[in-house]
Image (cartoon, rainbow, N blue to C red):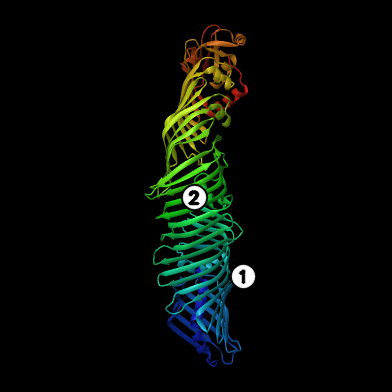
Amino acid sequence: MPLCRQSRPILVLLALCLLPGLLVWAAPVEARVLSARIARVTTAVAVLEQVEVDLDWPAQAPQGRLRLRAARIDAPDLGYRFGTVDWQCPLLRDGKGGWRCDGMVRSGRGQPLRLSLDLASASTDVRLARGAARLEVHRQAATPDDTVVDLTRVPLAWAQALSSQAWKEGRLKAGTLDGRLTVSTPASKPLQVAGELRLAGAALETPDASIAAENLGARLRIDYRKLNDTSLVAIDGELLGGELLFGTAYLALPQTPIALRIDGSQHGNAGWRLPHVEWRDGRTLVAQGMLAFSPDATLQDADFTLHSDDLSPVVARYLSGSLAAAGLSDVTVAGAADVRLHLASGQISEIDADLHDVTLHDGKARFRFDALDGDLRFSSGAALVNSMLRWRGGQLYGIDFGTAALPLQSGEGELRLRQRVSIPALGGSLRFDRFELRPPAGERGLQMRFGLALEAMDVGVLAKALDWPAFRGTLSGSIPNASYVDDRLVFDGGLAMRVFDGEVSVSSLSMERPFGVAPTLSADIAIDDLDLLAVTEVFDFGSITGRLDGRIADLRLVDWGATAFDAEFHTQQKRGVRQRISQRAVQNISSVGDASFVGSLQGRLIGLFDDFGYARIGISCRLVNEVCTMGGLHSAAAGDAAARGFTIVEGSGIPRLSVVGYNRQVDWPTLVERLAAVGKGDVKPVFE
């Protein structure tokens, strides 16, 4: 079994374990050749098997040639196990009663390293080097249980085996170590590795990439102990920049030092328990508490307090990964907060948060909350806990809302409103009759249920906020039950807008990924008895008098762009209501519907009239795969066009003018361009 690159520090064991024998074998310089075969050498640190020692020292020569070989070296407490090690070096006296040997050591197909040995009467020094990397081992006869290890630019990967003793899943990929460690192996006492280390450019990951680090720097004091199947570790020091990933939690550490302290223990095959963890990132974040992991490194239990005097850097440093997974990568936050978090069996058990003048802002202008204050308490237990959360104002998809206070209650894993809450918005109010929230647990994601009512909202204010044409009206409605499950928001009930002296109602409303990537909206819209003159004046379409009914069924918007619907609009005769259409409106309809005029007069005379009477107007569009299938009142009855034509405007009176469409399949982007051209007045009539 060839020696892996990560195991090179253990090479010094081969020399250390055989040093006493070297003194005996090399003493009689008259001996020309000395060979020894040792089946097994056992020390407090390692076991060597099938050891071969060969010494060739010519008579009266100033030096001899030493060769040490071992078929297998096993250091279980340090995690090293490898074989076929071969070291050759010239053996010299140092003139002080000691010995020196310096040569290349090889193992399997790995690159050779230089291994140097200085054996004095009261000390032993071993150096392992390759390039700028150097590992030195020092032992004193007066303290035989202690071994001092000095590290200079040692590749982090050399410590893989030792690291695996504490963290089996971790894979050390890059980085260097500097520092000094003391390895103590007293009889009947724990193995101890203690000292200070400086880490630079470190990179590591687990096989499933759930935990990873890149370019990590640190200054750490380490105390690791192991006795039988129990491991103890204490780490105290500073982190100096880099990137860390724990599941979806991504940490971008600043170059300014972050104080870190960890005390941990592991017994047998159980996971690690960290009874004391402390993290100090200046005014940005101070965290203290305990953590407990399962054997596969999954977080099982936690009890933590977190404090921030300045939340501004928190998102970039600690929350960007989690927020990105929820589609909120552009959120910024400011203010201060105190949070206590308790997890049990991998699930949130308690949250107690105090917010101090916190502002949340979405960079994509989906929402904003100003001056969040108060407390927010969540409990999975049977006992109920109350809290109160307030804000000064905010915005949702461009719609401003006012000051509100939310009286909250929690128990049995649910957060709910204690009473109705009205929030000022659009000159009216948005009233929440109930609200219940369950945070993610296990395979189940976030769930919400609520009921709300819209009361006397000003449609004109809404139109201005959404950059719609200016029109007036009120928006009211009730949604007695809405639910958010599996990233899908479904509304029961409907909304009604009193606009243009009629009503527009919305039903079957639902949203997918409302705050995520490519949000999707589905709805059915019904239009009842709108004043066409008011509609056409607001949308600058020309002038049409009459009353309009219609529907937009199976509407589907993806990222706020229409991808499917089945729409139909038609006029409804009403006693006492004139039905007239201006020439500009006629040519706009003909442009949108890809239609032509059919008149009772010569086309050149039609331009002499400002408006015309009509009996009916009707147009439809069914959008599928970016193609709009057009329709009208009925099939036209004029010549060869009858097979494909459809009437949009049915004329009445003199002059009698009708508008007939001939292209039933219209490209949707083209139709959108035509609608835009109508708004600019860039359309020309077509006469037949």
Vertical comparison of 354 with 620: above or below: below
The answer to whether residue 363 is left or right of residue 381 is right
Residue lying at the far top of the rendered structure = 654
Badge 2 amino acid: Ala
| Viewer-side label of 1, 2 | 2
For disc 2, the marked residue is: 353
Instruction: Name the residue rendered at 48%, 56% in the picture.
Output: 304
**Res 298 visible:** no
Observer-nearest residue: 389 or 30? 389
Observer-nearest residue: 282 or 232? 282
Q: Earlier in the sequence, mark 1 or mark 2?
A: 1
Q: What element carries label 2?
A: strand
Few, some or many residues within 10 Å of mark 2 (<14, 14–19, 20+):
many
Where residue 171 appears, as percent x and y from the top left, is 49, 62
Observer-nearest residue: 220 or 84? 220
Q: Is mark 1 on a helix, strand or loop?
A: loop
Mark 1 and mark 2 in contact? Answer it, CB < 8 Å: no
Residue lying at the far left of the rendered structure = 382
Instruction: Name the residue rendered at 42%, 44% in the picture.
Output: 409
Few, some or many residues within 10 Å of mark 1 (<14, 14–19, 20+):
few
For disc 1, the marked residue is: 132
Badge 1 amino acid: Ala
Instruction: Name the residue rendered at 39%, 67% in the picture.
Output: 268
Q: Quadrant of residue 684?
A: top right
**Res 32 visible:** yes
Observer-nearest residue: 437 or 222? 437
Where residue 412 appears, as percent x and y from the top left, is 38, 47
Where residue 457 appears, as percent x and y from the top left, is 51, 29
